[in-house]
Image: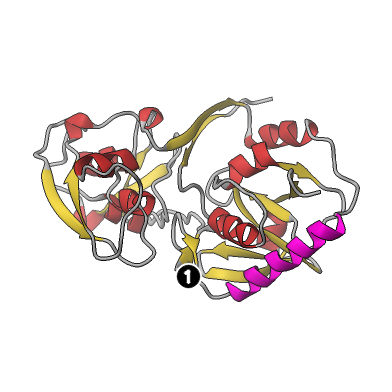
Amino acid sequence: MMQNKWKTLLSGALFTSVFLVASHVDAATYTVQKGDNLTKIATAHNTTVQQLKQWNKLSNDSIFLEQKLIVATLDKVPSNPVDKVNKPIANKTQYYTVAKGDNLTNIAKKYSATVSDVKKWNSLDSDAIKVGQKLKIQQVSAKDEVNVDEVEDVEEVIDFKETADEAIAKQLGSEQEIIATITSASEQMYNQVLMTANLSLGVPYVFGGNTMEGFDCSGFVNYAYQQAGITMTRKSSLMYFQQDTTKVKVPVPGDLVFFKNTIIPNISHMGIYIGNDEFIHAGSQGVTVANLKTKYWAERFVAFKRLNNVQ
């Protein structure tokens, strides 16, 4: 069996449901190498992280080994590309005004920084911020860049010597499938989950979002469950799949549904099952209802699972 070595970066705000699209023909491309991140790649090609994300339809900063990225359109190929990604550039300070719905995590992500960076720049002792507060944002010099596996707010770096399907099968094979249905108390909580989820229809997609201002896929699930009184630590869809859930034979409305191969080969999307082969999720179009029988989702469906603290 051919072994496929690949690397997945799971940032604190985590994977989303926005799908990668094919690169344009009239474009210069770059293949992601070990130790790369979007800031390094942007610096090396005289462009910005935001421009890279726009060209490659990326909704977050996550990239993986050997991924091909558009780094310039042919009519905009830089005449003097930077040869070394570690060429020092001057630090530049700017200010950001805290808006409604902001937190340190999403502010840090906007500037390819870490929460610790923002707290350090502003001498903050806690994560508490308020609307209208001005935060100092310091552009990090290229010489201060670190490898992606050293970045502080990366939740986990996984270096597989197995295919994504093998990793998924291994995880599911290690679980004792749940056959029993839920208790009446859990059913009541699930009803609250579904009510919250339905009230969230139309809320826009926001990378790292877990409020009614905007959600990503795992943030939406986390919010709906928390509103129902179900304790759920904020994680990525892959981490929920691996650490906090167990496969269930017959799902009930309120259980979780997981998908692979939306932005990476492994688990990269999740939603809440609502019955009749439908689920509600936060995707690129915001919170919507989708059908598991449609070709796209049927090809990417992995499993129904239940949070381990739901009985």
Quarter of the figure with residue 246: top right
Q: Position of residue 152 (x, y in %)?
A: 37, 33
Query: In the rendered image, is residue 17 in sight?
Result: no
- Residue at left 37%, top 53%? 106
Residue 2 lies in quadrant: top right
For image coordinates 63% across by 32% down, the residue present is: 163
The overriding secondary structure of the stretch rendered in magenta is helix
Q: Amino acid at mark 1?
A: Pro
Q: Which residues are magenta?
A: 183-200
Rendering coords of residue 294 (x, y %): 71, 66
Q: The residue tagged with tag 1: helix, strand or loop? A: loop
Q: Is residue 272 left or right of residue 116?
A: right
Question: How far across and how far down the image is residue 75, in percent?
Answer: 21, 58
Looking at this view, name the residue that lies furthest to the left. Answer: 90
Check residue 207 for magenta coloring. no
Is 198 inside the magenta-drawn segment? yes
On the image, the x and y values in percent for residue 201 come to 58, 74
Q: Is residue 54 above or below residue 176?
A: below
Q: Which residue is found at the position 60% from the left and 42% from the top?
A: 238
- For the residue carrying disc 1, how many other residues have a C-alpha within 10 Å: few (<14), some (14-19), or many (20+)? many
Residue at 55%, 63% (x, y): give it: 283
Image quarter in which the N terminus is found: top right
Residue marked by disc 1: 204
Total numbered circles: 1
